[in-house]
């Protein structure tokens, strides 16, 4: 025996109410425009947050062991970012050191035990062992400090190079300046 059908007024109650199509075209357009307008600042804020957490390193001079020798300068690496960096390896590379008699050193890099740090916290500094080379009578000097490190919470290593050039000041004192990369 077939199942009896419910009366029409009961069947209509089971169906979801249909909305009229009057005004629907304007409503979806304003909703999409609002999402687009609010999505742009949200995206810019997300990108700015990511960029602010990238490591920021800098190399500067902390003093000199031998002021008359350009390689007697003591450098330090500073973590200016907001997250720590790990597995820091530093090497100093003499790009071009020339003496007054035409002799020179170029392309020699050196790294030793003091060139490694397990962790460099934000705001901390690491002294670099670049004062190991002793060149007397230098006239010009250029070198590059290579830094390899792993940002915290990441598995890959990053490499940064800091090119420097020495200029002789009055009195024979050497002043190192960063070369724009």
Image (cartoon, rainbow, N blue to C red):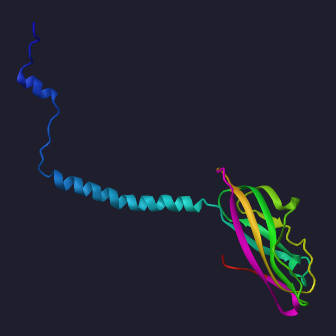
The residue shown at (6%, 20%) is: 7
Q: Nearer the viewer, residue 113 or 119?
A: 113
Q: Nearer the viewer, residue 147 or 5?
A: 147
Does residue 99 sit above or below 10 in this rendering? below
Asked whether residue 84 appears in the rendered view, the answer is no
Residue 89 is a magenta residue = no
Q: How far across and how far down the image is residue 34, in percent?
A: 30, 58
Res 20 → quadrant: top left
Res 164 → quadrant: bottom right
Q: How far across and how far down the image is residue 50, in percent?
A: 55, 58
**Furthest residue to the left?**
8
The residue shown at (74%, 71%) is: 59
The residue shown at (24%, 57%) is: 30
Which residues are the magenta region? 154-175
The residue shown at (66%, 57%) is: 83
Asked whether residue 70 appears in the rendered view, the answer is yes
**Furthest residue to the bottom?**
170
Q: How far across and how far down the image is residue 136, in percent?
A: 93, 83
| In the image: residue 133, left or right of residue 7 | right
Residue 155 is a magenta residue = yes
Image quarter hosting the N terminus: top left
Image quarter hosting the C terminus: bottom right
**Furthest residue to the top?**
1
Q: How far across and how far down the image is residue 40, in percent?
A: 39, 61
Q: Nearer the viewer, residue 44 or 107?
A: 107
């Amino acid at each position: 025996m077939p199942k009896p059908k419910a009366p029409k007024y009961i069947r209509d109650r089971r169906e979801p109410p249909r909305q009229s199509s009057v005004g629907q075209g304007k409503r979806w357009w304003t909703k999409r425009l609002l999402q687009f307008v609010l999505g742009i600042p949200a995206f810019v804020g997300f990108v700015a947050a990511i960029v602010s957490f990238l490591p920021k390193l800098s190399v500067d001079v902390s003093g000199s062991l031998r002021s008359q020798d350009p390689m007697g300068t003591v450098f330090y690496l500073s973590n200016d970012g907001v997250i720590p960096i790990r597995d820091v390896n530093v090497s100093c590379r003499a790009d071009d050191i020339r003496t007054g008699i035409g002799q020179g050193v170029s392309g020699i890099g050196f790294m030793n035990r003091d060139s490694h740090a397990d962790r460099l916290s934000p705001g901390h500094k690491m002294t670099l062992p670049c004062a190991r080379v002793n060149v007397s009578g230098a006239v010009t000097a250029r070198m590059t400090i290579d830094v390899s490190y792993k940002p915290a919470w990441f598995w890959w290593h990053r490499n940064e190079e800091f090119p420097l050039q020495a200029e002789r000041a009055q009195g024979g004192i050497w002043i190192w300046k960063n070369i724009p990369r």
